[in-house]
Amino acid sequence: MAQRLPYFRTYDVRGVFPDEVNADLAYKLGRAVVAWSGAKEVIVGRDARLSSPALAEVLIDGLRAGGATVLDVGLATTPMLNYAVARWRRHGLMVTASHNPKEYNGVKVIDPGVEQVYYGRGLERLEELLVTQRFTVGGTRGGLTLRTILPEYEAMIAARFREEVRGAPALVVDCANGVGGLPLGVLETLGIAYTLLYHVPNGEFPNHGCDTLRAENLRDLQGAVTQQDTGLGVMFDGDADRVAFVDGRGEAARLDHVFVLLARQALAGGSGRVFYDLRFSHAVKEEIEKQGGTAVTLRVGNPFHKEALHRHDDALLAAELSGHIMYREHFGIDDPLYATLKLLALLAQTGRGLAELLSTVPHYPGSGELRIETRDPLALIERARSRFGDAAVSMIDGITVEYPDWWFNLRPSNTEPVAKLVIEAATPEQLARRQSELLALFDGEEAR
């Protein structure tokens, strides 16, 4: 195709409803999925957005018109949909816009191997079929079966963690009025004391946004943790496949630092590969290798981490800085509830609080992710490569430049006309100096 459709993103179909993502698109996408996959049965789930029931209905109609029988699991988290895919070995479609604002919606496509279909691995073929409408003609209309995955999912979680979380501290869970509260009855089954915030699904997201990366969305959780003196706070995004953690002091915890704790826990049982995205602190690599593990840096994007977990027999776990945490033992599903219970098991085992455990992780001064408004991110990357040619350079995702006492990554956004910059250094002074140097190099562009 000469030009991509704007709502076909790198990892899914997503856009504003109904201007971009609407009933016509959903129907055609259902037809395209059947034509592309040849699937006889397809699992469909949906989140709590106001537009999700209508979109799911016409998506199901398109699938059935193509001849596929639909297994409709209804309102679900994306991890629950993925678990259904893993158990039933069918393609899965999740109607969701994840962490985006309420006016957005979309569809995630999951293959029977529990790997997300992205652009370059099938999503581009679906786009082509949607445009050309070369769908299967005739044939028998597929059926519709209402199925539930929640009881089986909860039973699996309870069996997996029943012994490990004995003595775990109380926690607060903020579901942001998404679907993350659906399986949380399992916490009571496990004997964990908990408080829920905004657990009733409401597509208006009336209390705060559902993006776990935005600091303002964590404020209610932070306040509840300190007021109730609980040991841990967690927030799930709209479809409950991303997580943010708050320690017992009410402070937001860096995901890469929490991941160090989870990696140490996993490596206590033996060596293996641990995957993480290239924005993580160098402390992650240092701590993984100190524990005898193999640290592997990947490009940004949770589908690539899932693939890595599935491709290597010695793989253990993976994470992306946006809050996706995945375990090979759990089909590579990015499941915040599973990761939270892993963390609670660690807190129970050690008898120490999250803040205390995080204090054992090396902290290097970092910039966080800076956004640089630009019409040509690739030109900025080339400028950086010319300027820092004496460094160790990787082009896995944008450009990563490494010196002994500082490093940075500059990469184009997959969804916006911006470049994203992350810098880490040995000292605050070094960080300030290098940040000024880089922003001067990109003079004329707007950083924020």
Image (cartoon, rainbow, N blue to C red):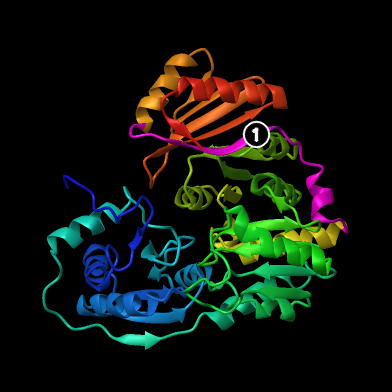
Specify the segment rendered in magenta: 351-376
Q: How many marks?
A: 1
Q: Which percent across, then down, holds residue 302? A: 49, 51
Q: Which percent across, then down, holds residue 164? A: 78, 67
Q: Residue at x 61, y 43 (%)?
A: 273
Q: From this view, report whether residue 296 is shown above or below residue 149.
A: above
Q: Which residue is mark 1?
A: 366
The quadrant in which residue 386 appears is: top left
Q: Amino acid at mark 1?
A: Gly
Q: Is residue 50 visible?
A: yes
In the rendered structure, does residue 353 fall within the stretch colored magenta?
Answer: yes
The quadrant in which residue 342 appears is: bottom right
Q: Residue at x 43, y 61 (%)?
A: 113
State the residue lying farthest toward the right.
351
Q: Nearer the viewer, residue 220 or 405?
A: 220
65 lies left or right of 17: left
* Crowding near the residue tagged with mark 1, few <14, some 14–19, many ≥20 C-alpha atoms within 10 Å: many
Q: Nearer the viewer, residue 98 or 262?
A: 98
56 lies left or right of 419: left
Q: From this view, report whether residue 101 is shown above or below residue 272.
A: below
SS for callout 1: strand
Q: From this view, report whether residue 118 is shown above or below residue 19.
A: above
Q: Which percent across, then down, holds residue 345? A: 77, 62
